[in-house]
Image: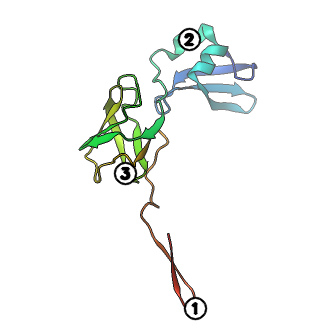
Amino acid sequence: MKIIDINGNNRDCSSVIPDFDWPGYVKAEIVDRSGIHSEWYTIDDFIKFNPSLKNLIKGAPKKKGEDLGVVTESKNNTLTDKKKIWGKDIFAGTPIWIARGRGEGQIRKVISNNKNTVVVDKIWDVLPDKTSQYLISPNAHSSKAVGNTLFVSTRSTRKMIE
């Protein structure tokens, strides 16, 4: 089949499938002189350039949303930001990371959410509070540098660097 890539070029393609490992993307197997190789396109770009092939991506998982903010309150396994108005469960399955403030460094997986509260997969070790900033993103990862202290020794003194 022929597809049009994001640069507007016609390309020979052996298949186009939703990529369930990368929500929001389709994987195209491109055929050229060097053989077959994979290329990924956002669903939106693929449909924009190939509207007649929209049926090939039916059932594709949508890209996970991202957001950040300041905690209004939290309980055992919830976090609330009353300034938000989210769609129901738009963050389900997405990591949430406490990036600053009380509870800094904790990472959990969002199980569900309503307009301004997320439910996480396990109880917070330290409850985030109004000093806490959070990030909800598929790119949020556990930080290993939180709470560490680095000691640097010199000949005559030992300095603490935080």
Q: CA distance from mark 3 to mark 2?
A: 40 Å
40 shown above or below 107? above
Name the residue tied to disc 3.
Answer: 106
Q: Amino acid at mark 3?
A: Gln
> How many labels sit on residues?
3
- Residue 3's label in the rendered image is none
Tell me what residue is drawn at x 31 percent, y 41 percent.
73
Residue 44 locus on image (x, y percent): 59, 19
Q: Amino acid at mark 2?
A: Lys
Quarter holding residue 75 = top left
In the figure, is residue 3 to the left or right of 123? Answer: right
- Residue 54's label in the rendered image is 2
Tell me what residue is drawn at x 75 percent, y 19 percent.
8
Q: CA distance from mark 3 to mark 1?
A: 37 Å
Q: Amino acid at mark 1?
A: Arg
14 shown above or below 70? above
Is residue 143 or residue 33 the one in the foreground?
143
Between discs 3 and 1, the one toward the N terminus: 3
Tell me what residue is drawn at x 37 percent, y 35 percent.
81
Give the number of the mark in front: 3 or 2.
3
For disc 1, the neighbor class at 10 Å (few under 14, some 14 to 19, many from 20) is: few
| Residue 71 visible in the displayed image | yes
For disc 3, the neighbor class at 10 Å (few under 14, some 14 to 19, many from 20) is: many
Name the residue tied to disc 1.
Answer: 155
Residue 140 locus on image (x, y percent): 46, 44
Is residue 46 or residue 141 the one in the foreground?
141
**Callouts 3 and 1 close, C-beta under 8 Å:** no
Quarter holding residue 59 = top left
Between discs 3 and 2, the one toward the N terminus: 2
